[in-house]
Amino acid sequence: MSWELVLDIFLDALKDSALVFAFVFLIHLLLSFVENKLSNYLIRHQKLAPMFGSLFGIIPQCGTSVMGADLYIKKYISIGTLVAIFLSCSDEAFIAILTSGIPSKMIMVLPLIGVKFVLGFVVGLLIDLIHREELVKEEVIEEETCHTHHTHNSGVHKHLIHPLIHALEIFAYVFVINMVLGLIIGAVGEDNFASFIRMNKYLTPLFSSIIGLIPNCASSLLLSELFIEGNLSFGALLAGLLVNSGLGMMVLLRNRKSAKNIWIIILICFLVAIVSGYITCLIFGF
């Protein structure tokens, strides 16, 4: 691997991590002002929460899955809402396809967004109907807010220092993961991925789903490039992007208290991706 490639991977990892930092910091900064109201609203309207999750996940930024995982760990959103976010998000894949300059590929972004939104909402809603989860209650949120107010003489810590520290922690974690996985993908090479897929087209939804599990923005961009170049079908792309939740999975895996639920979330997303991918391929071709 050349030093030029390593430098490119480093700069890409730094850029992606900086975007995640900015996104997480901004969201946490906003949440510090409306956290209790937003959390209580989601609790009172839990049936609609997966729909809000799917809408939030559509934002073409890898920070959405990180933010979703963070809110789930804090028990502000349900497992169904988190799955909705994971299924609907796609990192920068949509942007890559829209900027490809190929009309036949660009127009496919609309059905991608539509299918991912509907699947995220429906699957998330079904999960919440089956699995009832205890979320943070209104009284607890208010109590924590009061405690924070009395602990600090001003709102500087709550509204600036805490979001900044948390965003920096996420930045460091994301950068390391981005760098390591970027080096691995760079060592394998996109051409090798393309050749392998062309020789095993009937297994592409499965392979795309496995690639989509790689917790890195590079995996969604790799799938997008393969689709743009005509090496990947729409169904296979859909499968890979459904399971691709960026670094959200890694943030979840850091929290060992909910290890069982974390693997259930990963399994659900993976199965939904494979089934949806194969159904789409059978209808529109491999």
Image (cartoon, grey):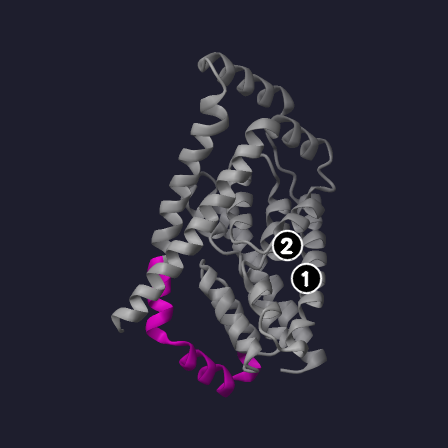
Q: Which residue is mark 1?
A: 113
Secondary structure found at label 1: helix
Mark count? 2
Examine the structure image and report whether residue 25 is included in the region drawn in magenta. Answer: no
Question: At 62% across and 40% down in the image, what residue appears?
Answer: 78
The percent position of residue 19, horizontal first and vertical second, equals 47, 50
Vertical order, 226 against 162 (above or below): below
Vertical order, 275 against 269 (above or below): below
Vertical order, 222 against 62 (above or below): below
Q: Which mark is residue 58?
A: 2
Which of the 4 image quadrants contains residue 202?
bottom right
The percent position of residue 139, horizontal first and vertical second, equals 62, 19
**Mark 2 vs mark 1, CA separation in Å:** 7 Å
Question: At 63% across and 74% down in the image, what residue appears?
Answer: 235
Work out which quarter of the rendered image holds the N terminus and state it. bottom left
Question: At 68% across and 79% down in the image, what residue appears?
Answer: 282
Instruction: Name the amino acid, label 1.
Output: Ile
Q: Which mark is residue 174?
A: none
Secondary structure found at label 2: loop
Span colored in magenta: 179-203
- Of the pair 136 and 129, the residue shown nearer to us: 136
Dot 1 surroundings within 10 Å: few (below 14), some, or many (20 or more)? some
- Of the pair 148 and 120, the residue shown nearer to us: 148
Dot 2 surroundings within 10 Å: few (below 14), some, or many (20 or more)? many
The percent position of residue 10, horizontal first and vertical second, equals 33, 60
Label 2–label 1 contact, CB within 8 A: yes
